[in-house]
Amino acid sequence: MKKIVVLSGAGVSAESGIRTFRDSDGLWEEYRVEDVASIEGWYRNKELVLDFYNQRRRALKGAEPNKAHKIIAELEEKYKVCVVTQNVDNLHERAGSTNIIHLHGELTKARSTKNEEKSYDIGYNDIHLGDKAPDGGQMRPFIVWFGESVPRLSDAAKEVQTADILIIIGTSLNVYPAAGLIHYTKPGCKIYLVDPQPMPLKMENFTQIQEKATIGMEKIKEELF
């Protein structure tokens, strides 16, 4: 059975109503990334950061997986599939994907400021200043912020190294270190890139599908099934 690795970014969930940072009407229009998505921002204003992610969690509760998420899950019918996502939502899980690496953490989980490895499922509930983990540390979002290491990056690289097909969807390949994963592909790996904007990559076996995520995944499904 051939192996597919899907590298997904914010553009996959945008069609489910999850706002991205980088779009023209994105979250960066309202928030400075260094205030709400960096470890320095957390130290400066914990209340602002907690409120920001509480809002993201509430928005996620009302969102549904779209056709792109569902087709990615359907690939498991014929392929061994690993989803490596930069997204912190749970829409891949809710669509039915079973093997997912979250590079940047998960909105529906929290962790203690004293332990970066152990997480707690909180669903769509808020986190407040003063909420303590069992170890006595302040609870914070289980999110990898700018300025923090990406603990699952090596796991993702190992998956990409053994892929027969790599599908890159919903990411501009501008956010490192995740963007560097494409360079771990083995010779002969077929690479699909789904993005409305032209993105010339000088790599063998490379195909761009210049469409939004849902249409792009429908076209890939036609080829792979």
Image: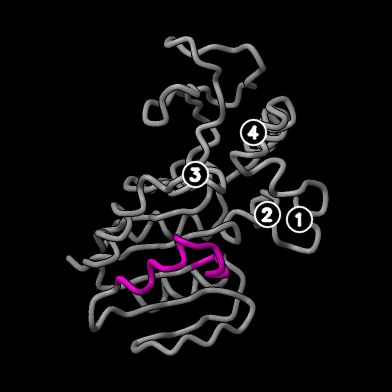
Is residue 176 on the magenta stretch? yes
Are discs 4 and 3 less than 8 Å apart at CB?
no
Quarter of the image that includes the C terminus? bottom left
Query: Relative to the observer, which residue lies in front, 41 or 90?
Result: 41
**Residue at 42 percent of width and 77 percent of height:** 192
- Secondary element under disc 4, as helix, strand or loop, is helix
Foreground: disc 4 or disc 1: 4
Mark 4 or mark 1, earlier in chain:
1
Going by the numbered disc 1, the residue's amino acid type is Gly
Name which residue type carries label 4: Trp
Q: Which mark is residue 148?
A: 3
- Distance from label 4 to label 3 (Cα)? 12 Å
> Label 3 amino acid?
Glu
Q: Tag 1 or tag 2, which sits nearer the N-term?
A: 2
Q: Which residues are magenta?
A: 169-184
Q: Alpha-carbon distance for marks 3 and 1?
A: 23 Å
Label 1 sits on residue: 26
Q: Position of residue 154 (x, y in %)?
A: 30, 54
